[in-house]
Image (cartoon, helix red, strand yellow):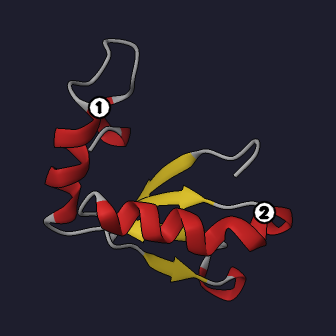
Amino acid sequence: MAGRRGAADEAGLLLRLHPRDEPWWPVVRAALAVVGLPAALLEAEAGGPAFRIGGRRLARLAELVGDRPPTAPVDLWP
């Protein structure tokens, strides 16, 4: 996931993926699931490649990453 950032959208948080890292996508998806963040894979046609974390899982993400740093935009923090 080199050089990519997360982004918020109406359905949750997108964790952007780089196409050249595609062999690692299943590993990342499995790691997210292990920590309680099963993510949907969005194809390029749907705004990806990215993993989307949404709904009540955003609370779990916030629990894992902790409090928002003062410099982080409020609308981009879970």
Tell whether 15 sits left or right of 45.
left
Disc 2 element: helix
- The residue that appears at 20% across and 24% down in the rendered structure is 67
Q: Position of residue 77 (x, y in %)?
A: 31, 38
- The residue that appears at 28% across and 68% down in the rendered structure is 54
- The residue that appears at 22% across and 29% down in the rendered structure is 66
Label 2 amino acid? Answer: Asp
Q: Is residue 78 above or below residue 42?
A: above
Q: Position of residue 1 (x, y in %)?
A: 69, 52
Q: Is residue 66 above or below residue 25?
A: above
Label 1 amino acid? Answer: Val
* Circle number at residue 74: 1
Q: Is residue 62 above or below residue 46?
A: above
Q: Position of residue 27 (x, y in %)?
A: 57, 67
Q: Quadrant of residue 13?
A: bottom left
Q: Which residue is mark 2?
A: 21
